[in-house]
Image (cartoon, rainbow, N blue to C red):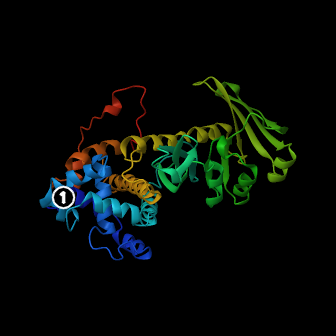
Amino acid sequence: MNAGKLLFAQLMDFLPWTSFARSVARYGGDCRVRSLSCAEQFRAMAFAQLTYRESLRDIEACLSAQPAKLYAMGFRSPVRRSTLAEANESRDWRIYAELAQRLMVQARKLYATEDLGMDLQAAAYALDSTTIDLCLSLFPWAYFRTTKSAVKMHTLLDLRGNIPTFIRVTTGDVHDVNILDEILPQLGAYYVMDRGYLDYARLYRIHLAGAFFVTRAKSNLDANRIYSQQVDKQTGILADQSIALNGYDSRKDYPSHLRRIRFHDPETDKDLVFLTNQFTLPAATICALYKSRWQVELFFKWIKQHLRIKVFVGTSENAVKTQIWIAVSVYLLVAIVKKKLELPGSLYTLLQVLSVTLFEKMPISQALQQKDYTTSELTTGNQLILFDF
């Protein structure tokens, strides 16, 4: 890398700007724009994510403090908060969604060989959503309940590398199960979901597509046992059975047999019941697959803690979705840089280093490839070390 470039500019060089330009042209993002192009808007919002800026005034003040370096960062003129606010309100959020989706493809290729931690060669995905609470008076378009608004971020996470492969941002009143209609099942892949996605008709479509699902059974499951496998209860597996659904509607929606596994979790001292259409894998592997679903919860926790998606700099639907998609793009960008440059440390550590070195002129690999990283994440025994790959 060119040592004369600012670290921020070197980081932006990893983005697929040609693809981004096509998206801008497709949605007319730069039509009749005299200042702050879509590319500059992305840079300003990405700068806010990387340096933990909380408001438009904050972004403007920090960039104005380095006027001699703005051109080297990719800005043709100073960034004004009014211009940035107007851009967030008017530039189509799908421009940044397409950029994030392009980065998803790149990141997945880089992390395709990551170990799942279990004897499984097929692709495995975890599906879940997180709710981002909003003020009802400021965000009336995102109505959720009588007292508040909210948006939901529905995410399908590739468990190899914890890279999102599908994200949909909706209002808070959209039920999770509806997202199954938008996902095209991959032949032979595994989809791990919680009980909120238990819809037999939709699960049967996954089954017919040649894919597999693992989910939790509800307490009111009505089914009869067809066959029981022998199990070693010392492993925590209490039962491994083939079942047929009894209810008229459920049997109509899912006419085939299901596999029911009852597992005792020693950590919570609770019995968990899993349902799957995979009959050949060991029961312990099915339980481990469901346990890996926790990675998507950690992904949500990570981006909420370390990226700016809880406080928004705009109140319109377009501004909120723009900020969320740019935050996702920043996460993917740092993951791509980490893998391409074979950098040590976690994504959290890399973000911390970037936040204080973006204006430095040094090779990005030199700035990030330190061997003595220590983070506060390692100081508490009850806090998970997130994405330390």
What secondary structure is found at the residue carrying circle 1? loop
Residue holding disc 1: 6
Indicate the quadrant containing the C terminus: top left, top right, bottom left or bottom right: top left
Quarter holding residue 147: top right
| Image point (35%, 73%), residue name | 30
Q: Where is residue 274 in the image (x, y as percent from the top left)?
A: 69, 38
Label 1: few (<14), some (14–19) or many (≥20) C-alpha neighbours in 10 Å: many
Q: Where is residue 375 in the image (x, y as percent from the top left)?
A: 30, 35
Q: Give the number of callouts.
A: 1
| Image point (41%, 63%), residue name | 96
Please, is residue 346 above or below residue 62 in the view? above
Side of 64 where 239 appears, left or right: right
| Image point (64%, 56%), residue name | 188
Amino acid at dot 1 = Leu
Q: Position of residue 319 (x, y in %)?
A: 41, 58
Residue positioned most to the front: 137
Q: Position of residue 165 (x, y in %)?
A: 51, 56
Please, is residue 66 above or below residue 351 in the view? below
Quarter holding residue 321: bottom left
Side of 13 where 24 appears, left or right: right
Please, is residue 154 above or below residue 68 in the view? above
Which is nearer the eye, 317 or 306? 317
Please, is residue 237 above or below residue 74 in the view? above
Which is nearer the eye, 3 or 127? 127
Which is nearer the eye, 275 or 195? 195
State whether residue 8 appears in this view. Answer: yes
Side of 323 where 39 appears, left or right: left
State whether residue 154 appears in this view. Answer: no
